[in-house]
Structure formats: structure tokens, C-alpha cells
Image: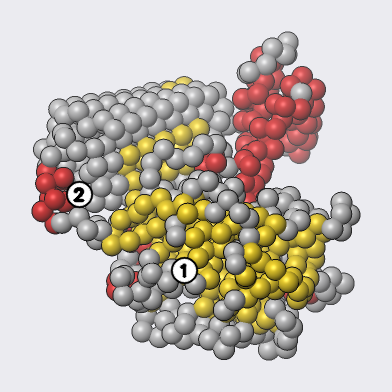
Amino acid sequence: MKKSILLLGVITLVCFFIVENSLGESDFLEIKKVMAQEDDVLGGVEWSPQHEGVEKYLPVIKNTNWKVEKFVTGLQWPTTMDFIGNDILILEKNSGNVRLIRDGVLQEKIALTVNVDFLGERGLLGILTENSFVYLFFTESENDDIVKNTIYKYRFDDGRLIEPELLHSFPAGASGIHNGGILAKNNDNQIFVIIGDNHNEEGIFQNNPSSMEIEERGIVKEITGGEYYAIGIRNSFGLTVDSQTGNLWDTENGNLLYDEINLIHPKFNSGWSKITGPDLENKRQDLPEYENFVYSDPKFSWEVTVSPTALSFIDSELFPELKNSLLVGDFNHGILYEFKLNEDRTEFIFKNEKLQDKVANRDESVDEIVLGSGFNGITDIKMGPDGLIYIISIMDGSIYRISPNIEKEENAILRCKNVEVNLDLSNCNLSNRDLSNRDLSNRDFSFANLTSADLSNSKLENSKIWNADLSNSKLENSNMKNVDIFSSNFFNSNMKNVQLINAKIRQSNFNEANLFNSNFSKSNLATTVFDNSNMSKIDLRNSVINYVTFNQVNFKDANLENIYPYSSDFSNAFLDNSVRNSCLADNIVDRGLNMILKNIRQSNFPLNSIIEQIIMIIC
């Protein structure tokens, strides 16, 4: 047995070498892309499918009393912003430019340009204003050999930042990621900065007391000195203060799994590198005792990474619904989340029983906490002096603004009633409606309620179905080519003979759906569940499948050719008579083998057929 395993290992290595030599470096970039997805947010930003093209839709918001509009465009990799009077100062990560927005117009005159190194997550990252003073955090590049993260203080005068004063510097790290840099001011006018671990787990502040590394990283501290407020921080893009309590909150990106939202009390230990997410294995006993630093579990975690970034408390008379909430943005999906707070503002309140353990597991719906979507890489959320909400989209190069919606109720009812006339059906209640045999192409169904609706034999090509509920709906024989489905619920829906060619499906629920004889070819499926669904005779050829669960799925007579699934679970699926030519197990070896299969089939190497046979035997 051991010899067989060794032989297979040797064959696998031989396959790697043969394919590498035959394909060349450009083809192996695809393998690097897959491996890069193992890390979090901006460390793998250039490989993320979210960034291959800007979304064609404007963001949407769940609350029908609000509207979203594009406020400013034309920015290059904008990261964070702050208001100074009625003006906005906004940072561009790579250019080192501090841009001025006055009267809603992006000024041509640059407020300041600093010399930045923008490798990976480095660049111009954090800003905070205080009266006429401005504090900036950026990765300063003095020359090719000396790079450091720095905090400078400037004076704002006539649209310019002048009189620079260096306050503090931190190591930048060799890899260029996990820099941190977000600034926040508490009720005592103390300014804090959050610093990542520079992609280095070995260090005193990474809970390794025997390490010789004592650099200032993985911490929260007051910018002009003083004691460390928190340690054990891995990688953060969000830090804010609740003005009602004075409490500090942060977001933290986990390693592969469990992104976090934390309440940071004084002497807080966030647990890294011993703990990521909730302490499910009682690893807190392995944490060193550092001067009364105390660990506590995150207030919320996502099992599958979403890369949370900015977070903000909104205390505005224009949004009374948000007075007891925390808003959080994510980078990977451009979602705006709303977390309801308890009376003490120290915990979150959930109606969904599955979220009451403070974890969004892989197969659990997060609809309850989704306030908006489509922001395409959120990096900052701020309330303006006008009481409106401003959101930065780094990938759109834009600032979006949320404001009260003046649409009258009767107009909204008319819009939702005339489904064949109006393209915008967002937030419409269409439950139990007979919408069969209709042309509903190019519609926006964001946040629509379509439970038990009859959409059979209808045409929904190129439609947008974001955060919508289609549970128990009828979609039999419908045409859904090129549809964009995101965070939507198709539980127990009848989707027999549906055309979903070239569809984009992310973070959605198809549990117990009937998908018999449907066509998903050339589609892109990610972080979606199909548990207990009927997918017999389904066509999944040439689809991209990442982090999808097919527990107890019937794939009898299905076509699964050329799908090369990445980290997806077919372990309990019924595959009788199905056609498949790739590995279906959920482990790193099968992922690598699938990548080799994909590449050799695109090449003309003479031994392709032999290599394929060997790999399929290993699978």
C-alpha cells in the first residue's frame, strides 16, 4: 500500500515537471492565481474574479426609503477619506495623491502628493482630520532599499496640505501586505492607528513570546506613543469609534477562513497567530500572558472570507433606522452590511437563529444583515456633515452617496405593478404573482420578493437578481441566459429545463431545488449551496465552480465535463452515469491536478492523453 502511494506521488511530480516544461511560464500563472485565492483580500487582489471588470449595475439598497447615487468619479484606487468642513479629502493608494472634493466636484489641483511604495497593499492608506490638521498614514519610499509605514501631521490651508511633521514610523514588511493604517479618534481626542502583522506570524505581538521579533506590528496604539491598546491583529482595513460609548471596533481578515468584527477593549488580544475567528478548539489557553492582555471572541465572523474593510456608526437624523446599528463594508463582494446592536451596544442582535452563534457559516443565509450590494470593493464608509452616507468603491474609482428617497409610495406601487414596462423592479413585492410567459429580460430584481411566484416559460435574460427571494417559485422552462444572481434564495424552487447558460451565480441558496435537465454550461458558480437538489441530466460543462456545496445532490446522467472545481464538495453526491473528466474531491492535491488537466488540454504536448489517464487514475 505504501509503495502504491509513493508511486502515485512520484507520477504526480513527474506530471508537474512535464507540464511545466511544455506549457511555459504564462500558462502557469493560472496555477498561481488559484494559489493566490488561498490568501485574503488585497494580498491577492490582482487575481480576484471580482476585479476582472467593473460591474455594469449601480449599487442597490434594501431600504426603499433611501436611494444610491454616484457622487464623484474619476479617482484612481481610492482608499479612505475624511471631511474637513464641507470639503472631502480622499486618498489615492498608488499615486500618493491626496485629492480635494469641493461642492461635489473633484478638483484638478492636488492637495498633496507623497512618495509612496504601492506594492501589494502598500500605499496611501489612512486619513483623519482634526480641526485644520490632517493626519496621513502611508508607505513612504525614500529609495529602492528603504520603505516604511509612516504617520505624518499636516496643516490644511487653502486646499493644500502643508507643514509636514513626522509623528511615527512602523516597519512595512517585505511582502507588501498586511500593513493596516486606518486611523480613528476616540471621545478623548486620542488618535489610534491599527497595524497589521506585515504577513509575518513570528513576533512578540503575534503571540509568540519566544520570538526575537519585537517590531511594532499586529497592534492598535495611540499614534504619538503610549502603551499598546491591542495586540494579536493579523490584517485590518477598518477601525472606528462608537461615539455613544467610546468603544473601539475593528474588522480583521482571517487566514483562509473566519473574517472578523471585533470590539476592542483596552488591553485586547485578538488572538493571532494562535486563533482565527471564534475559539472553537479552546486555543486561548495557548495564548501567552502579556501584561493583562485579554482575549475575547469576535462579535461576528464569516466562515468563508468576504474581506471586511470599513465600518462606521451613523448618527444622522436623516437615517433614524441606523441609530442603533453598525455599518460594515466588504471588499470581495461590495456588500454593505447592517448589524443591529443590543442596548449596551456591545453585541449584535439577530432574528435568524443560525446567526445567533455570531458566525455566518458557509451554508447560512446572511440576507438579514445585507443592507446594500454592488459597491464593487468598499474601502471606506463615512457620514458627511450633511448627514448623508458616503461610500468609496476602490474598483469603480468612485464615491457613492446614500440619501433619503423622495419617490412617493404610489409611484413605487405603480413601478412594481407594471413589470412588463419598468426595468427597475428592485424592492418590489411580487410574491405569488403570475409572471409566466413574460419577457422580463434586462430587469433589476434586487431585493425583490418573488416567493411562490410563477415565472415559468418566461424570459429573464441579462437580468439582475441580487438579494432576492425566489423560494418555492416556479421557473420551469424559463430562459435565464447571462443572468447575474447574487446572495439570492431559490430554496425548493422548480427550475426544470431552465437555460442558465453563461450565468453568474454567487453566495446563493439552491437547496432542495429541482434543476432537472437544466443547462448551466459556461457559468460561474461561487460560494453557493445546492444541497439535496435534483441536478440529474444537468449540463455543467465548461463552468467555473469555486467553493460550492453539492451535498446529497442527484447528478445522475449529468454532464460535468471541463469543470475543474476549486474547493467544492461533491463527496456525498450521487454521480451515477454522469460524464466527468476532472477531480471532484475537495483538497489541495485535486485542485493542483485539475489545474494541470485544464492546461494540458489547452496545449499540444504529445503525451497529453497519457498524462490525462494517469491523473484520472490518481483522482
Question: Where, by quadrant of the figure, is residue 116 drawn?
Answer: bottom right
Residue 609: give x, y in percent of width and height: 66, 14
Residue 607 picture quarter: top right
> Which quadrant holds the C terminus?
top right
Q: Mark 1 sits on what residue?
A: 86
Nearer to the camera, 567 or 374: 374
Splitting the image into 4 quarters, where does residue 322 fall?
bottom left
Determine whether the residue tagged by mark 2 lies in a helix, strand or loop: loop
Residue kind at label 2, given as amino acid type? Cys
Is residue 347 in view from this perspective?
Answer: yes
How far from the left and from the top, in percent, is residue 466? 34, 46
- Judged by depth in the image, the label closer to the viewer, 2 or 1, is 1
Amino acid carrying label 1: it is Asn
Q: Residue at x 31, y 42 (%)?
A: 465
Image coordinates for residue 254, horizontal then vertical, percent: 60, 60
* Cβ atoms under marks 2 and 1 closer than 8 Å: no
Q: Which residue is mark 2?
A: 428
In the displayed structure, would residue 217 be above or below residue 290?
above
Percent of width and height locating residue 95: 68, 50
Drawn side of residue 552 relative to residue 443, left or right: right
Q: Residue at x 56, y 27 (%)?
A: 582
Instruction: Decide which of 351, 263 is in the foreground and name it.
Output: 263
Q: In terms of depth relative to the viewer, which is nearer, 199 or 141?
A: 141
- What residue appears at the point 31 percent right and 70 percent down from the top-left corner? 319
